[in-house]
Image (cartoon, helix red, strand yellow):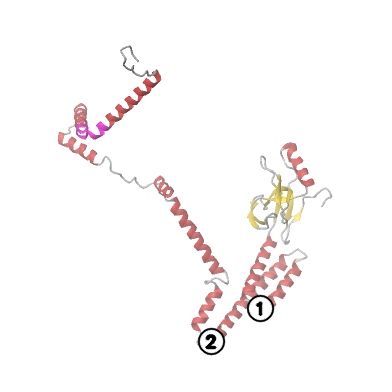
């Protein structure tokens, strides 16, 4: 308190005083901005005076009425949105804004396409050839007996077509095959074919036709499986996983890829040894004994380049790959 008994004013530090001054300055600027924005008439008058002064300097002949009209049009359209002209960047911007909706639409189109493909290419599909034949028979039949006859005729016709397709595939398989097991496999498939034809089992005949086509495609494949050896890329890994019995075990793997005759990586369908699921990949890991893993690791560690890369070879005419990477016992 002061000597006369009155409370003395609180003491303010220099930093606090500077902060107060900054706040006051900012408030003054904001007040001036607001006043300027709302003082439209004063702004128009100031702009009019400047335009007239500029025209007198440049020598342009502009009347006061024209200046007033230009100012009025400017303020009338000041906050009016104008659609930008069409351009590639504008199209990209619209696509980005609607990306969520477009993604949902794309998923729906792909789903419908998948359902349509299934219905057209499977015997169970409502638009498949089998289903169409059934509907036509029902529509054209004049009695239950006539319907039974028509369905029997349709089944015989379709079975004959599938039999022809399977026999053509098996003939081509015999011609291209160099695998000793394939002729016996073909004989077994033909025996199944005869039984299916007698039973008019169109569904099983369809599956057999797909099986022989897949086998022919497999025999025609030719490629090499190489261990990945490019710089800064892993050639092998060791990891733990749970086996079929739920036990935690360690595994040693080399990372491989299939290459065609030009050295390009090609996709393959391989079975995941841990999940037992078929997956289509361009690179996968093959489990190997620890001795082979250690040998590959030492080779790569020596100079960063893997000299031993050939893992397996798939020759045309053979169903399976031939292992080329040998272990310590040359097996």
Q: Would you say the magenta stretch is mainly helix, strand or loop?
A: helix
Given residues 146 and 248, the one toward you in this image is 248
Residue farthest to the top, as pictured: 3
> In which quadrant will I find the N terminus?
top left
CA–CA distance in space, label 1 to label 2: 24 Å
Picture quadrant of residue 150? bottom right
Q: How many marks?
A: 2
Name the secondary structure under disc 2: helix
Q: Which residue is mark 2?
A: 144
Residue at the image point whose x is 45% and y is 54% from the top: 102
Q: Can residue 63 be seen by looking at this rendering?
A: no
Query: Given this view, does label 1 or label 2 mark the residue nearer the observer?
Result: 2
Q: Which residue is mark 1?
A: 197
Say left or right for 262 vs 181: left
Residue at the image point whose x is 56% and y is 68% from the top: 121
Q: Is residue 61 above or below residue 125?
A: above
Given residues 235 and 214, the one toward you in this image is 235
């Amino acid at each position: 308190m002061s000597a006369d008994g009155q409370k003395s004013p609180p003491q303010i530090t220099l930093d606090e005083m500077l902060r107060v001054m900054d706040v006051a300055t900012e408030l003054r600027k904001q007040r001036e901005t607001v006043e300027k924005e709302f003082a439209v008439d004063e702004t128009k008058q100031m702009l009019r005076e400047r335009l007239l002064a500029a025209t007198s300097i440049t020598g342009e002949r502009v009347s006061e009425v024209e200046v007033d009209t230009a100012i009025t049009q400017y303020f009338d359209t000041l906050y009016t949105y104008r659609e930008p002209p069409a351009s590639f960047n504008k199209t990209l911007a619209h696509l980005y804004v609607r990306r969520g909706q477009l993604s949902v639409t794309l998923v729906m189109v792909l789903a419908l396409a998948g359902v349509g493909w299934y219905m057209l290419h499977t015997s169970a599909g409502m638009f498949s050839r089998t289903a169409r034949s059934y509907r036509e028979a029902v529509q054209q039949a004049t009695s239950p007996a006539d319907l039974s006859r028509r369905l029997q005729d349709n089944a015989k016709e379709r079975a004959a077509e599938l039999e022809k397709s399977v026999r053509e595939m098996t003939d081509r398989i015999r011609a291209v095959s160099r695998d000793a097991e394939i002729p016996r496999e073909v004989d077994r498939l033909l025996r199944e074919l005869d039984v299916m034809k007698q039973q008019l089992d169109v569904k099983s005949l369809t599956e057999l036709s797909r099986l022989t086509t897949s086998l022919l495609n497999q025999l025609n494949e030719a490629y090499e499986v190489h261990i990945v050896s490019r710089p800064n890329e892993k050639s092998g890994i060791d990891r733990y996983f749970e086996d079929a019995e739920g036990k935690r075990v360690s595994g040693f793997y080399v990372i491989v890829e299939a290459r065609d005759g030009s050295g390009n990586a090609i996709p393959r369908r391989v079975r995941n040894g841990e999940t037992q699921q078929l997956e289509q990949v361009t690179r996968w890991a093959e489990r190997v004994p620890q001795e082979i893993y250690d040998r590959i690791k030492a080779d790569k560690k020596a100079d960063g380049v893997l000299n031993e890369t050939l893992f397996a070879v798939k020759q045309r005419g053979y169903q399976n790959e031939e292992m080329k990477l040998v272990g310590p016992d040359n097996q």
